[in-house]
Amino acid sequence: MVGGGQLARMSAAPAAALGINFRVLAASPDESAAQVVADTHIGRHDDPDAVAAFARGCDVITFDHEHVPPAILEQVEALGVAVRPGPSALFHAQDKAHMRRALAGFPAPRWTVVTEVQGAIDFAQEVGYPIILKTTRGGYDGRGVWRIESAPDLASAMSVQLPPGAEWLVEECVVFVRELAAQVARSPSGQSVAYPVVQTIQRDGICAEVIAPAPDLADERAVEAQRLALDIAANLEVTGMLAVEMFDTGSGILVNELAMRPHNSGHWSIEGAVTSQFENHLRAVLDLPLGAPTTVAPHAVMINILGGDVPNLYSAFRHVMARDPRLHVHLYGKEVRPGRKVGHVTAVGTDLPALLDRARHAADYFMGVIDE
């Protein structure tokens, strides 16, 4: 797995259970996965020599992020190593304009690519303010995304330096009831499974909470979202996990973003599903039969722990564990910095309001929002 973040870290346990020799390419020995994976190589994901050296001796290469340049992946394929998802599929998650073009025919917000401020102003006059401005490459967790209320806001936002190879993408600002995510796993042989559609709650562009399955989502709407995700995975020839972030407008569903890897919206599945997203990602890229994605209880909730006023997260264990022995805590081994994802908590059961209260309390204690 190229990338040594928390997604690689959480892939280590199912890899061990499956008896897979799991190797990670991490940028430094301090990264999340490097702390727990014995076979860790140190190198940058954008260094062709480092990636090639890492790939030698591997049967399959996969990823915990989408940032490896396609040319490097093509070089790895030339070595005879399977790359899953492949370079052409992964590029859809690397470049938002490329993704929008490839998803023509799927329901999505109105959008266009512009090269200067006037083009964005013209688009805004057509669809109405506010609009959403994005860099087509390099953005995540709210970075590289602006909500634009006026032409002066556009001029200010577009004065920043674009990442290499990026363009400006403008989209209509969708009025939605809530945000959903549909995750599917797909293997090279074409087998696919769909996880329950979840509701995500975003704060400051970062996923804060996930509820699985999405509450009060009509069966036909849930099936529509799953079908969209399955169709996108097949059309783009995705191998592994695909997360499709969506807007529920109340009258329909629009596709917002794609991620071709395990995703924050699926962390609940570690304890809440028969087969976690991490295990199914490994099964998929190895072309093994996929596991059941069904839930083990009526509800599962996942709350992200963001860096706050508690620098030593371990110090919070005694309170959190004693107060709620049924709670599941995952810490990522990251240095605590304000707003940084440093862990998550999951609660699984039958009483959704109680699950949310319990998980929120634990996350707030880890973040220093509360002290009792």
Image: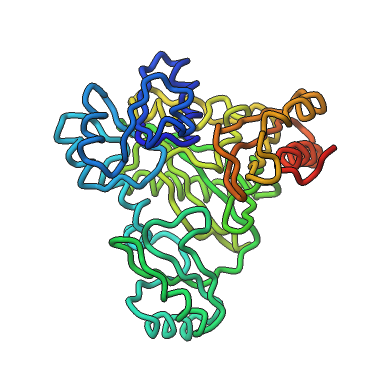
User: Closer to the camera, 363 or 177?
Assistant: 363
| 164 vs 258: above or below | below
| 2 vs 70: above or below | above
User: Closer to the camera, 239 or 60?
Assistant: 60
Where is residue 186? Give x, y as percent: 39, 35
Could you tell me which residue is drawn at 66 percent across and 43 percent down? Answer: 211
Which quadrant is home to the N terminus?
A: top left
Where, by quadrant of the figure, is residue 61 drawn? top left
Residue extending farthest to the left is 78
Scheme by which the image is coloured: rainbow
User: Closer to the camera, 273 or 30?
Assistant: 30
Where is residue 259? Give x, y as percent: 43, 47
| 25 vs 70: above or below | above
Where is residue 67? Give x, y as percent: 35, 47
For residue 205, side relative to residue 42 (left or right)? right
Could you tell me which residue is drawn at 63 percent across and 45 percent down? Answer: 306
- The number of callouts visible is 0
User: Closer to the camera, 24 or 272?
Assistant: 24
Could you tell me which residue is drawn at 48 percent across and 86 percent down? Answer: 125
| 179 vs 153: above or below | above
Residue extending farthest to the front is 311
For residue 103, side relative to residue 176 (left or right)? left
Where is residue 239? Give x, y as percent: 34, 37
Which quadrant is home to the C terminus?
A: top right
